[in-house]
Amino acid sequence: MPGNLFHPHELTVTGPSFIFRSTHIHTCIHTYTAFSGVLNGDFVDYEGTETSTFVTVPEGSQDLTGWTIGASVRRIKSGDSAWGSVSSVSGNFFTCIHNNRAGGLISTVLSGMQIGSLYSVTWNERDRPGYQSRALTVKIGGCEGVDISSEHTVPDGWETKQATFVATAASTVLCFITAGGTEDGSIFLDAIAAQIGEETPRLRKKRCPQAEAPD
Ligand SMILES: [Ca+2]
């Protein structure tokens, strides 16, 4: 009957034909799930109680909406003189992986992805004025996952960066991580976003048809 993915005729098929149909059904399920993007990628939303121009978000805190905190992080108001009078890129705040020499991370969940489709992540990065610079790595699949931007030293002023990946799961953890340094220093991050990219020609062949008549 129309709309029934498990049409009785299909269930009787064995061998390679059945394997093809199973893969096809799986792809179609994810076509209709909305991509989450990055929640609070401009760091404007804050659920804590501190009200100063910069606040400490400790490891394990849920105060920075949408983000998981590893090691010490600061949420800093644009132009705060205590942090080099750096202006934010978007909204009125940016975030800082601080923790001086020990390094740290922030991570968030991307969900609603279509397996096999291309996604891009954009972000803005820089160091803290007057302090040792830091190397940043961006990963998917968790903070011990796969590099989408290999370890690199962040610049002295804001730069917009982009990386792409092909989804291998409907959801994944996007992680920004630094190993720290030998002197005090920080990484500033802002305007983090993720978008659905264009599919490659090879993957485009697997897209679901508009309607599929039963055999
Ligand atoms: Ca911001």
Image: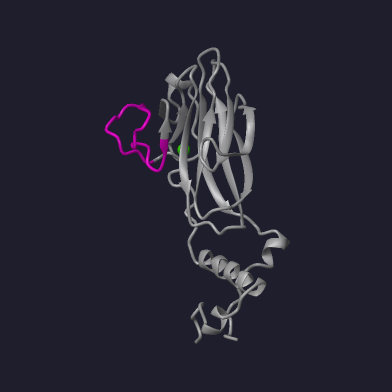
Q: Does 24 lie within the magenta span?
A: no
Q: Residue at x 41, y 27 (%)?
A: 74
State the image coordinates of residue 200 (x, y, percent, origin top left): 70, 59
State the image coordinates of residue 183 (x, y, percent, origin top left): 53, 12
Q: Does 51 lie within the magenta span?
A: yes
State the image coordinates of residue 46 (x, y, percent, origin top left): 35, 38
State the image coordinates of residue 47 (x, y, percent, origin top left): 31, 39
Quadrant of residue 15 in the image?
A: bottom right
The segment highlighted magenta reads 45-68
Residue that extends furthest to the left in the rendered view of this protein:
49
Q: Label the magenta part by its dominant secondary structure.
A: loop
- Answer yes or no: is residue 89 visible: no
Residue that extends furthest to the top in the rendered view of this protein:
183
- Answer yes or no: is residue 70 visible: yes
Quick one: 3 or 108, which is closer to the camera?
Answer: 3
Quick one: 49 or 62, which is closer to the camera?
Answer: 62
Quadrant of residue 40 in the image?
A: top left
Quick one: 164 or 145, which is closer to the camera?
Answer: 145
Left or right for 53, reference 2: left
Quarter of the figure that contains the C terminus: bottom right
In the rendered view, tell whether residue 21 sits above or below residue 104.
below
Q: Residue at x 49, y 80 (%)?
A: 4
Render colour scheme:
one colour
Quick one: 198 or 45, which is closer to the camera?
Answer: 198
In the rendered view, tell whether residue 5 sits above or below residue 68.
below
The count of marks equals: 0
Left or right for 123, reference 201: left
Residue that extends furthest to the right in the rendered view of this protein:
201
